[in-house]
Image (cartoon, rainbow, N blue to C red):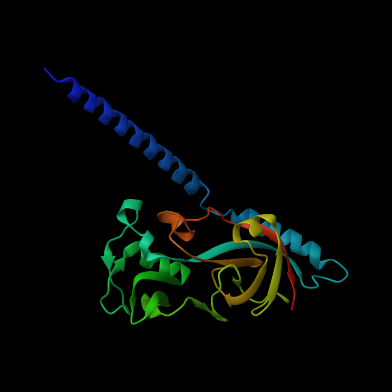
Amino acid sequence: METTSHRSFDRWADRIAFRHLIAGISVFSILAHSELRADIPWTEVVRRLAYENERLARRPQGHNGEYFVVCTLYYTPKESGFTFERGFDATPVTKPGLHGRQYPRDFLRSVKKEGFGRIVTPVNGRNYIRYSGGGSYAFASNPTGGGGVLVPRFSAAIKSAQGSLRHGAMVETESPEVQKIFRSNRWKIMDTGGGLRRWQIDCYYGEDEPLGPGKLMGRPRATTFEYGYANARITN
């Protein structure tokens, strides 16, 4: 016959298992909710941008340095966040340009999308990997854009020149949501990207581990921000 202490241990173990189950369900619910919100409704966004900017263009003074934009986010992913425990494909792989050094597969996928990634162990004093195009990578000293080293919550990118919204422009955005997430409303357009949309400003968040695997790799762990509308004014 089992002793009382053994039965107590079983009850304790059952309670721990139950708590782990509840915690697992909670995490799954959060990730599932985030996954459902992972896609920007571009059809709706493009329609809204076109409507609002047409209204501005019809004014007697035209745009006059004012635009209605959608602010999105890009960041520099950190290798440390890409683990099997968090659901990533962390299989060590190498790519051309890495000289045989291996990194988590999903980390390199994220670097390909975001442009740069921070590595755990520096290589010849360089703390970053950049995607060079054509499936090749290289080590780098800093994340950079067409206008120099990227500055968190200040550097930004656009698709191409749109009137005075161009490379080198200083932009002030008016949006409570964007201000809350980035704690900034001043941006410098330092880069252009073929994958961006007209009247989209891609704002640089800084370095962080990814929010999660799959589509969530495109967002930093510190926020679930996807996009926010803003009135933008060129100040230079």
User: As displayed, is residue 11 above or below residue 178?
Assistant: above
Residue 230 drawn at (x, y percent): 70, 60
13 sits left or right of 200 in the view: left
User: Extreme top residue here?
Assistant: 1
Pick the front one: 128 or 98 = 128
Task: Give me the residue at 66% from left, 59% from top.
Answer: 179
Q: Quadrant of residue 163?
A: bottom right
User: As displayed, is residue 115 above or below residue 179?
Assistant: below
Q: Quadrant of residue 185?
A: bottom right
User: As displayed, is residue 9 above or below residue 116?
Assistant: above
Q: Quadrant of residue 151?
A: bottom right
User: Extreme front residue here?
Assistant: 5
Quarter of the image with the C terminus is bottom right
Figure disc tally: 0
Residue 159 drawn at (x, y percent): 60, 72
7 sits left or right of 138 in the view: left
Residue 208 drawn at (x, y percent): 46, 62
Quarter of the image with the N terminus is top left
Evaluate whether residue 117 shows in this view: yes
Residue 81 drawn at (x, y percent): 38, 59
User: Extreme left residue here?
Assistant: 1
207 sits left or right of 13 in the view: right
Evaluate whether residue 158 shows in this view: no
Task: Give me the residue at 43% from left, 60% from top.
Answer: 209
